[in-house]
Amino acid sequence: IAAQDRKLALWNIAVAYIAFLIGTLAGLLQVFIRNDALQLPSWLDYYQILTAHGVLLALIFTTYFIFGFFITGMSKSLGSFGPKVRLTAWIGFAVTTIGTVLATIMIVSGKASVLYTFYAPLKASGWFYVGLALFVVGTWITSFALVGHYIVWRKEHKGKLSPLFAFMAITTIVMWIISCLGVVATVVFQFIPWAFGWVDTINVELSRSLFWYFGHPLVYFWLLPAYMAWYVVVPKLLGTKVFSDSLARLAFVLFILFSIPVGFHHQLTEPGISDFWKFLQVVLTFMVIVPSLITAFSMFATFEIAGRQKGGKGLFGWIKKLPWKDVRFTSIFVAMAFFIPGGAGGIINASFQLNELVHNTLWIVGHFHITVGTPVAMTFMGLTFWLIPYLTGRKFSKSMQKLGFIQIITWTIGMLLMSTSQHILGLLGAPRRTAYSGYNDHPAAQGWFEGLITNHVTMAIGGSILFLSAMILIYIVVMSMFLSPKAEREEDFVDFPMAESDSEHTPKFLENWWIWIGIAFALIIIAYAIPLGAMLDFPGSEGYKTW
Ligand code: HAS
């Protein structure tokens, strides 16, 4: 791809890894504080660090990495960007970064300890919300640049389906833009006036609902780029094609439809929403599981086909033929494996009654460490191993490959220990988001920490192993960006592995965006109009109130 597009992608990835570095450091502190092994200096507190950890890793690292990946893949699959697209993407990057810096300063200076789920009644400095608004607007500008690039391609290739990578990137962007409407509404119309003191009160239930309208699709904004790697990169590493182009596109389209009207499953224990609307959104949540099941099916099919093409015999003989020694593949495979318990945990959370047991406990913290913290993060790690060398034209040597293995093995062990203990502690009843790590020495709480995996020592070991892993990754990133030798011979160049996808029989309507955007809005209106209307005191909404 063009040198200027590489530069743009690299800047995005560089900011992602700066956020990763600070965020994982906050994670290490988190583990030690929770295990009573560390006393914080007076200017730092538990919630400040927790906010930094969540915002920098879950929001900033992911978003920048995703755009770095999208820019590279869109330029590779549709051709290099034109000057207008490139300029718009730089403006988007600049606005996002100004927002990021502003929000980070507020968090670090202790003026925004409101956690990464910053809904009311917690209140931060108004500048934190200004930073957030700029962050979202910046991502929209970059998104418009990518959509513009796609539209130009469509005009030049009338009647043709776009390449699978571009289709998937645009699907993710469409979902992102629709879902951000909720967070922009609450930040601009509720938080900014409230935090700057222009109004005295805030509608708490409305702010939480608008946040979760955005908060759930947010998790698919992280997941879908990982799925893109699974669908498009993995088959190439296995030496085969995409299993089914139409099934892959269908799975992505289903995410546009079902990932948004489901936010109430984060609010199942809240009194301000009636059971009917909660139940409706629980049903829709079970619909959004379908595209992940489609993905699991497609992955198993891809593995088996590739293994058999390489001569694997018998029921399971093909497994041995997969390229286990290639860290780009193995890292992503382990990431996928984590998503089996991760997804199962999600189904438990979404089950109306079971949610009562797990809500607001450490179980949820365990859940998101084996969804975004491993399947997504480890897929991004697997991409990093070749993406940065591809962009910088540097080598990814054998010793780097070995280091990559140590990195993913340590991440796997650390996450296994930490998330298993979090799940168990959650089931025992340990609450999340509390600075009282020993739970005030309550006798019941003391018993929780006597388990083999749930004791303080194992958890601290898990957290430290994770931090070690993160530092190895940072070393690999710095080497691939600045220090590894430049590739000179043909075989040293690292390429973007993008599998062929046979779209000859793919129905054209799958790329008719208006159908999917139309249905998505219809579902959103069905799921949200009446309960949000009641929260806003619309005339005639009295009958729908639960308070
Ligand atoms: Fe979740 C809470 C429900 C998926 C992230 N979730 C959270 C929070 C986060 C998060 C961050 O219904 C906490 C928010 C907070 O701070 O309060 N989640 C679900 C459901 C799914 C789900 C139904 N979550 C995710 C993903 C995330 C994520 C993905 C990040 C990327 N989640 C909930 C609910 C809550 C929640 C409730 C609120 C709980 C509460 O009360 O607070 C589904 O999308 C999951 C579907 C996935 C599957 C798995 C398919 C498996 C695949 C892998 C195949 C493997 C292969 C490898 C091929 C059905 C695709 C083979 C290897 C071998 C070894 C065999």
Image (cartoon, helix red, strand yellow):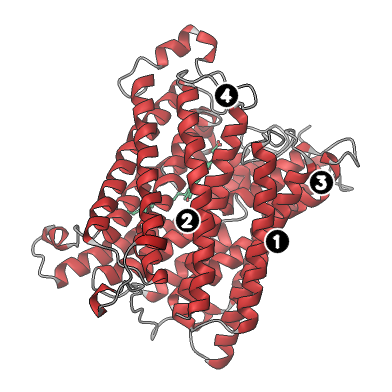
Q: CA distance from mark 2 to mark 1?
A: 21 Å
Which residue is disc 4 drawn over? 434
Where residue 334 appears, x then y in whole percent? 30, 50
368 or 308, which is in the foreground?
Answer: 368
Q: Quadrant of the C terminus?
A: top right
Is residue 100 rendered to the left or right of residue 2?
right
Q: Earlier in the sequence, mark 2 or mark 1?
A: 1
Residue type indicated by callout 4: Thr
Task: Give the amino acid at mark 1.
Answer: Val
Residue 34: percent from the left, percent from the top? 48, 23
- Label 1: element kind: helix
Q: Distance from label 2 to label 4 (Cα)?
A: 27 Å
Return the residue nearer the eye: 444 or 118.
Answer: 118
Residue in view at x 42 percent, y 29 percent: 422
Residue ID for mark 3: 192
Badge 1 crowding class, 10 Å Cα cut-off, few under 14, some 14 to 19, many 20 or more, is some
- Badge 3 element: helix
Amino acid type of the residue tagged 3 in the rendering: Ile
Q: Is residue 517 visible?
A: no
